[in-house]
């Protein structure tokens, strides 16, 4: 069995694997693919100490760093079930391939995926004007016109943030009312370069072949379709944790986030979690890496204290 088995090969999983291997314990890492969401990212300029990198380059770097340590890496594999253990026992991770891996401790770092609008043009212009992360990509739209899709807390926060950088922000909400906290809505309404369109459904993203040039939305009250000219679209309709397979094994929030405490411990003995799949606020690479390190150190602590098998 492994002393520590890590599920997920994104920034959180890679950090956990390196911290575990450096303790000289038997470490395994199982992942669908290395790099996680960074594979879908263009420029990264907020990974502290790295002035600029590109997502796929970071994903390669994470993989080679992990492989430079004593870690048994299993890629192209999906974990399908977790059966936690009692103290001193072995947890089981069942793979979709049918194999079962056993481990004394487990670090879960399956990440998350952005919910997309699923409208024509969105996938085509992803990273060419269609963006999902205002902290990451906001500065690329300095002085430009953007829309934020979604009037929940993350959409309204994104709109406030972007209003300080861009020329103009249009917030588009599907429902008749914004769902964000009242204080955020009040702040948003106080800004001079923001317009809010409610009861509107985005129906298409337009581009010139290279970049986004606009979007179409349907007024849900009248049925009329309108077009907005702009350079950027931030989709803020939710981040979905890749935790469906963990239901019943560890405590999840209503939104599917794995509940962790300050030591990254989950509700199950010997099971820790890190990164975008957890309740930790602010889904960012440095945060996922820091929490991955913390999860591995907490798991190591658990190993030292565990009763002999
Ligand atoms: P992920 O990166 O999602 O990795 C999850 C890993 O788990 C993957 O390897 C996946 O294959 C694997 N996996 C999932 N489920 C299973 C399973 N059941 N079995 C096996 N393996 C599984 N953050 C920044 O700090 N700066 C940026 O500039 C930035 N830009 C971004 C741009 C975009 C377009 C996106 C989508 C995100 C961006 N982010 C950025 C956010 C950042 O990518 C995430 O916060 C970070 O990748 C989270 O790391 P993670 O390890 O928790 O999860």
Image: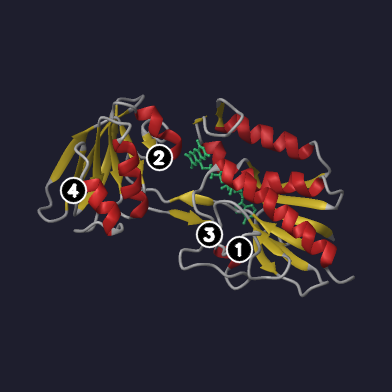
| Mark whose residue sits in front, 2 or 4 | 2
Residue, far left: 222
Which quadrant holds the N terminus? bottom right
Q: Which mark is residue 245?
A: none
Q: Is there CB contact under 8 Å for labels 2 and 4?
A: no
User: Cβ(mark 4) to ligand 1 < 8 Å?
Assistant: no
Q: Which mark is residue 218?
A: 4
Q: Which mark is residue 279?
A: 3
Q: Quick one: label 1 or label 2, which is nearer the N terminus?
A: 2
User: Cβ(mark 1) to ligand 1 < 8 Å?
Assistant: no
Horizontal and vertical percent position of residue 88 = 83, 72
Query: Is 115 situated above or below 131?
Result: below
Q: Separation of disc 1 and disc 2 at Cα?
A: 27 Å
Q: Separation of disc 2 and disc 3 at Cα?
A: 19 Å
- Count of numbered marks: 4
| Mark whose residue sits in front, 3 or 1 | 1
Query: Is 180 situated above or below 145?
Result: below
Q: Quick one: label 2 or label 3, which is nearer the N terminus?
A: 2
Q: Quick one: label 3 or label 4, which is nearer the N terminus?
A: 4
Q: Separation of disc 3 and disc 4 at Cα?
A: 34 Å
Q: Separation of disc 4 and disc 1 at Cα?
A: 43 Å
Residue found at x 30% / y 50%? 150
Crowd class of label 1 (few under 14; some 14 to 19; many from 20; radius 10 Å):
few
Q: Separation of disc 2 and disc 4 at Cα?
A: 24 Å
Residue found at x 85% / y 52%? 25
Q: Which residue is mark 2?
A: 134
Q: Is there CB contact under 8 Å for labels 3 and 4?
A: no
């Amino acid at each position: 069995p492994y002393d520590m088995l890590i599920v997920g090969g994104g920034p959180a999983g890679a950090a956990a694997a390196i911290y575990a291997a450096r303790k000289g314990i038997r470490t395994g890492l199982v992942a669908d693919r290395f790099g996680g969401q960074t594979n879908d990212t263009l420029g990264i300029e907020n990974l502290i100490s790295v002035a600029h990198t590109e997502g796929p380059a970071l994903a390669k770097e994470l993989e080679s760093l992990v492989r430079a340590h004593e870690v048994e890496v299993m890629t192209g594999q999906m974990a399908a079930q977790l059966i936690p253990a009692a103290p001193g026992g072995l947890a089981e991770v069942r793979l979709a391939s049918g194999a079962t891996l056993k481990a004394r401790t487990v670090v879960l770092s399956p990440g998350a995926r952005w919910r997309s609008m699923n409208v024509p043009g969105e996938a085509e212009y992803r990273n060419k004007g269609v963006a999902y992360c205002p902290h990451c990509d906001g500065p690329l739209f300095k002085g430009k016109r953007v829309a934020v899709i979604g009037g929940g807390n993350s959409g309204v926060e994104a709109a406030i943030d972007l209003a300080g950088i861009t020329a103009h922000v249009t917030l588009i909400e599907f429902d008749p009312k914004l769902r964000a906290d009242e204080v955020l809505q009040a702040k948003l309404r106080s800004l001079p370069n923001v317009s809010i369109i409610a009861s509107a459904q985005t129906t298409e993203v337009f581009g010139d072949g290279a970049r986004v040039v606009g979007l179409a939305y349907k007024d849900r009250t009248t049925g009329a379709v309108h077009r907005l000219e702009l350079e950027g679209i931030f989709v803020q309709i939710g981040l979905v944790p890749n935790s469906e397979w963990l239901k019943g094994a560890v405590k999840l929030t209503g939104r599917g986030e794995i509940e962790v405490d300050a030591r990254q411990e989950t509700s199950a003995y010997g099971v820790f979690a890190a990164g975008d799949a957890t309740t930790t606020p602010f889904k960012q690479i440095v945060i996922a890496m820091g929490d991955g390190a913390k999860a591995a150190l907490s798991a190591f602590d658990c190993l030292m204290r565990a009763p002999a098998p």
